[in-house]
Image (tube, rainbow, N blue to C red):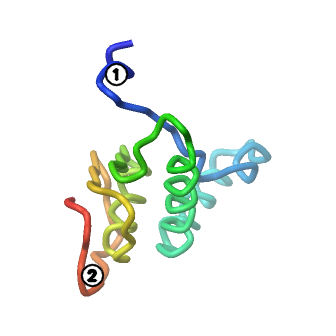
């Protein structure tokens, strides 16, 4: 694997956890995603938990971690940045969107 040879490790965080596995109707899924979109602290907490877990992995350089999110995940990593959470070197949001632009914390430490 080229990524492994270059020192890259990928990890896909399950933000929803067991909550989504118990939802069958699309409207219920929309409501669940809205819960995270409307509560930036909860969303960022889930991402922070994933970051903390990844840093415990033997194959991971804990000082060289980035978070990348697409669409819903892209929104989450933007929330993570605006809340001023640190512990990562970079944040990449692809097709992420915010319902409203939050007031940024005093400093956004990682590169966004």
Label 1 or label 2, whichever comes before in sequence order = 1
Judged from the image, the secondary structure of the residue bearing numbered disc 2 is loop
Categorize mark 2 by other alpha carbons within 10 Å: few (<14), some (14-19), many (20+).
few
What whole-number distance in Å separates the C-alpha atoms at marks 1 and 2?
33 Å
- Count up the numbered dots: 2
The image's mark for residue 107 is none
Quarter of image, res 30: bottom right
Residue matched to label 1: 3
Which x, y percent locates residue 61? 40, 44
Quarter of image, res 1: top left
Tell whether 3 sits left or right of 47: left
The image's mark for residue 104 is 2
Which x, y percent locates residue 83? 37, 77
Categorize mark 1 by other alpha carbons within 10 Å: few (<14), some (14-19), many (20+).
few
Please report the residue visible at 28 percent of the width from the left and 47 percent of the height from the top. 95
Judged from the image, the secondary structure of the residue bearing numbered disc 1 is helix
Which x, y percent locates residue 39? 52, 74
Please report the residue visible at 51 percent of the width from the left and 75 percent of the height from the top. 41
Please report the residue visible at 32 percent of the width from the left and 68 percent of the height from the top. 81
> Hey, which residue is sitting farthest top in the picture?
1
Q: Is residue 70 above or below residue 90?
A: above
Please report the residue visible at 36 percent of the width from the left and 68 percent of the height from the top. 86
> Hey, which residue is sitting farthest left in the picture?
111
Tell whether 35 sits left or right of 80: right
Q: Nearer the viewer, mark 1 or mark 2?
A: 1
Label 1 with label 2: CB-CB less than 8 Å: no
């Amino acid at each position: 694997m080229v990524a492994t040879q270059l020192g890259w490790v990928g990890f896909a965080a399950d933000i929803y956890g067991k909550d989504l596995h118990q939802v069958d109707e699309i409207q219920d899924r929309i409501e669940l995603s809205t819960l995270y979109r409307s509560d930036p602290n909860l969303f960022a907490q889930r991402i922070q938990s994933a970051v903390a877990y990844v840093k415990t992995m033997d194959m991971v350089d804990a000082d060289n971690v980035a978070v990348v999110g697409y669409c819903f995940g892209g929104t989450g990593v933007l929330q993570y940045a605006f809340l001023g959470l640190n512990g990562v070197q970079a944040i990449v949001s692809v097709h992420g969107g915010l319902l409203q632009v939050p007031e940024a914390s005093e400093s956004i430490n990682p590169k966004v």
